[in-house]
Amino acid sequence: MEMEKAYKKECYSTLIAFIVVTLLTHVFPMYFLFPGLIEMTIFGFPAHYFLTLVLGWLVLMPLYWIYIQISEKIDREITDLSGRAAELEEVRVYTAAQTKGEAK
């Protein structure tokens, strides 16, 4: 049950990260809402190119770092749970073997 929760957390965090990245990298609707951005320039670049570049590097990189930290934490949790599950399985097999040995 705990393992299932950990996998669900991983799926939800990945889905949220995907949605955020998609919204930040596909900013083209902003240019339809604010057509003046296409005519403006920032540092000599067309504003829509510059904003896409800034969103791509300055905003997404910290977001990727946060996502990686969350993902690593969940992966450690899954690894710990997997190790405990393997230990419990070994104990179960050992106990079953001992029980069979006593029954003979």
Image (cartoon, rainbow, N blue to C red):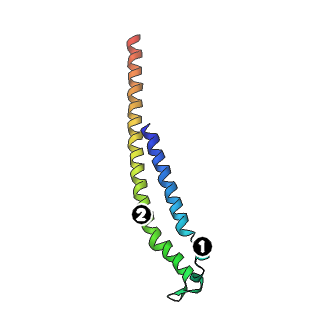
Specify the farthest residue to the bottom. Answer: 44
Q: CA distance from mark 1 to mark 2?
A: 24 Å
Instruction: Give SS at disc 2.
Output: helix
Which mark is in front, 1 or 2? 1
Q: Which residue is mark 1?
A: 28
Q: Is residue 28 left or right of residue 93?
A: right
Identify the amino acid type marked 2: Trp
Circle 2 residues within 10 Å: few <14, some 14–19, many ≥20: few
Q: Which residue is mark 2?
A: 65
Camera-side residue of 39 and 88: 39
Q: Count of labels shown?
A: 2
At 57% across and 69% down in the image, what residue appears? Answer: 26
At 60% across and 71% down in the image, what residue appears? Answer: 29
Identify the amino acid type marked 1: Phe
Give percent across and percent down for residue 15. Answer: 52, 55
At 47% across and 45% down in the image, what residue appears? Answer: 7
At 45% across and 48% down in the image, what residue appears? Answer: 9
Residue 23 sits in which quadrant?
bottom right
Residue 1 shows which numbered tag?
none
Q: Quadrant of the C terminus?
A: top left
Q: Is residue 90 left or right of residue 50?
A: left
Instruction: Give SS at disc 1.
Output: helix
Circle 1 residues within 10 Å: few <14, some 14–19, many ≥20: few
Give percent across and percent down for residue 47. Answer: 54, 82
Give percent across and percent down for residue 98. Answer: 38, 19
Residue 93 sits in which quadrant?
top left
Give percent across and percent down for residue 72. Answer: 41, 54
Q: Specify which label sits upstream in the sequence, 1 or 2.
A: 1
